[in-house]
Amino acid sequence: MITTSNLSKKYNNNLVLKIDSLEIPRGQSFGLVGNNGAGKTTYFSLLLDLIQPTTGYINNNNVLVHESEDWKPFTSSFIDESFLIGYLTAEEYFYFIGELRNQNKADVDKLLAQFEDFFHGEILKQKKYLRDLSKGNQKKAGIVAALIGNPEVIILDEPFANLDPTTQIRLKGIIKDLAEKQGVTVLISSHDLMHVTDVCERIVVLEKGEIIKDLATNSATLKELEAHFSGTTVV
Amino acid sequence: MIKRFLSLEWKQFSRASYFQKGIAIKILLFFAALYFGGIAVFLGVGIFFILKKAVPDVDPIETVNNFLIYWVLFDLVIRFFMQQLPVMNIKPLMAIPIKRKTIVHFLLGKTTLSFFNIITILLFVPFCVVLLVKGYAVLNVICWFLSIMFITLSVNFLNFLINKNNTFFYIITSVLAVLVGLEFYGIYKTSEPIGMAFNALFNNPYLVIIPLGLLIGLYRLNFSYIINEFYLDGAISKKVEKVDTTDLTWMNRFGSITIFLKNDVRLIWRNARPKQVLMMSFLFLFYGLIFYTQETYQKMPAFLAFASMFVTGGFLMTFGQLVPSWDSEYYKLLMSQNIPYRKYLESKWYLMVVAVAISFVLSTPYLYFGWKIFGMIAAGALFNIGLNSFITLFGGALNRVPIELNVKAKAFGNTNGFNPTQMLIALPKLVLPMLLFYVPYKLINFEVGLIVLALSGVLGIVFKNFFLSKIESIYQKGKYKTIAAFAEKN
């Protein structure tokens, strides 16, 4: 589904990302972990054509991301609050995204109904603008908006951060369901090793912009990751 | 402690992103400040002599006193719309051991350094110097000056209360409305006793206590108001607004641009900055009064054409020049969605066209100045719709300054959306209507001048798609730069 080849990004001769080759098949739940500055958000921004690659390319479902815009209809994302329109209410925002993705009001309502649990009564019918919601609730709205319009690729940057425990658990269920049952390719990044091993079938570790581990998740993965990040070597 | 606050403020000022822009902007800003300061000083010096000539039998100081109330009201109104409230970033200060009182005093003290207070000093100091030179009693002049300053500062603090508290706002606006109404219809002239009061202030220096008392009273009122609300959810915090739930489904008839149009309407309605622009563009409607009422300009029809363009073009120019910037807060979202630039631009264009149309309807009272003037306004409106709109959008496309939507622009720190390219683009906007009108006017006659100006607008509408494609390509070319620039805020 997503092929990354020879990709690098430099800022003033400062190499922040260098991925020679990375292949993400359709329907995989893919996790990206790494310390601050490892290049996670840079990679996602390149995937969304928000920044220009210095070398190489990303191919999303046979579309070269930095050359054509045809990847947009089947790709959706929530990276940070700048993906929200602060002066809209949650409903208005969902309908706006829905219209951009050719979904009418009824379609959007149908989708939102599935997430009543996830919203926990704090998003819809709140008579509040998005900018006045708490960080966690903003995130909830942003994540659900990224699910509107049956995307085939969903990119979520740090989806677990700022969420309360209940919502974190619900979100894990949602992500698993997307990848396993609906065949959606889900890319997430996280600092929470536990969550990411729970949710993702594959985990890639970035360090200083390079891939240093590429693991298929199994029962030993969490241990291995913890060992890696605590600086001890695995036996 | 105060010293440390001051150094924080200085850092906030000198490290603000707009200050680290190019040297060109700094120079421009410097000249702008110099210009306005200079005008104020010049006016301050000149007013004495102007009044002496205009009303020879009345002492100039009396004339000034009679009209002073209008200055105070004007000051209040301008402040209400323009002055930023002192929302110091108090969150980090709340938990460290500083006395609340100190912080509040500083917060209030800071507002006295506002541009609006400085302009008063620049105006009245030269005037008072002239008074002294002309031999008015020293004590009277100094006390009068102090009174003016106290009143100005009172307005400063009054504005804070009005802004924070709706009841104050309604009380004051209704009282003002009644007084202005009575004055206008000649039932009771409130300005006369107030003028007398100001004269009394001048003649009896000891009365300076009254404005001083007023100032102290207002300061204390502000102080107790803030200290009682000194909590994260109190007066100093940002307000959580009530949602306005106007139904915009009627807009669905606009077809494919509806999505954007709805959003744009909400953008303007729900954010402080665009609302301010809306207010300002309303003032543009009165621009014609300056030109049409003066004999001298009647013989300079090119200037009249220029003014006529402004009458209907206020919103178009002030809103349009910041077109992608309005969406800077969520530009990444727009760029990662399947958004046709064309529809996005078209929506903004329609918005501008509607604004010109509304301004045109509102400008019908200009018929008073005769059909020729009104014809000019009509031709100017067509020029605005057909050409000016595209020139403005073009200029906006080159502009990559992020805007904080829900923050009022500062009166002077406002370099948001202000750069040299913008200035260059502004030139054709101003010169073109003059040329389009003046050349045929000189060569043939007045009517042909009007027709050419109007036709230029029609021609622009015919080539709308061509212009929009051109602007679109700028957007595409600058995509990464724009995203990076918009992400830079804070």
Image (spheres, coloured by chain):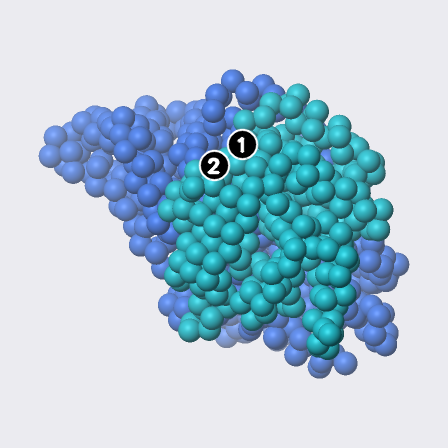
Chain colours: A cyan, B blue
Q: Which mark is residue A176?
A: none
Residue B389, placed above or below residue B411: above
The chain under label 2 reads B
Residue found 36% across the figure and 59% down from its top: B420
Residue B107: x %, y % from top left: 74, 67
Q: Which residue is mark 1?
A: A100
Q: Which residue is mark 2?
A: B339
Mark 1 closeness class: few <14, some 14–19, many ≥20 residues within 10 Å: many
Residue A95: x %, y % from top left: 63, 30
The chain under label 1 reads A
Residue B154: tell me if it is visible.
Answer: no
Residue found 84% across the figure and 51% down from its top: A165
Q: Amino acid at mark 2?
A: Ile
Mark 2 closeness class: few <14, some 14–19, many ≥20 residues within 10 Å: some
Identify the secondary structure beneath mark 2. loop
> How far apart are the alpha carbons under marks 1 and 2?
7 Å
Residue B341: x %, y % from top left: 42, 37
Q: In this orientation, which residue lies closer to the viewer: B246 or B283?
A: B246
Q: Amino acid at mark 1?
A: Leu
Residue B335, placed above or below residue B418: above
Residue found 42% across the figure and 42% down from its top: A63
Residue B229: tell me if it is visible.
Answer: yes
Residue A218, placed above or below residue B144: above
Residue found 72% across the figure and 49% down from its top: A199
Residues tagged by mark 1 and mark 2 found on one chain of the structure? no
Image quarter hosting the C terminus of chain A: bottom right
Q: Are marks 1 and 2 in contact (CB under 8 Å)?
A: yes
The number of numbered discs placed on residues in the rendered structure image is 2
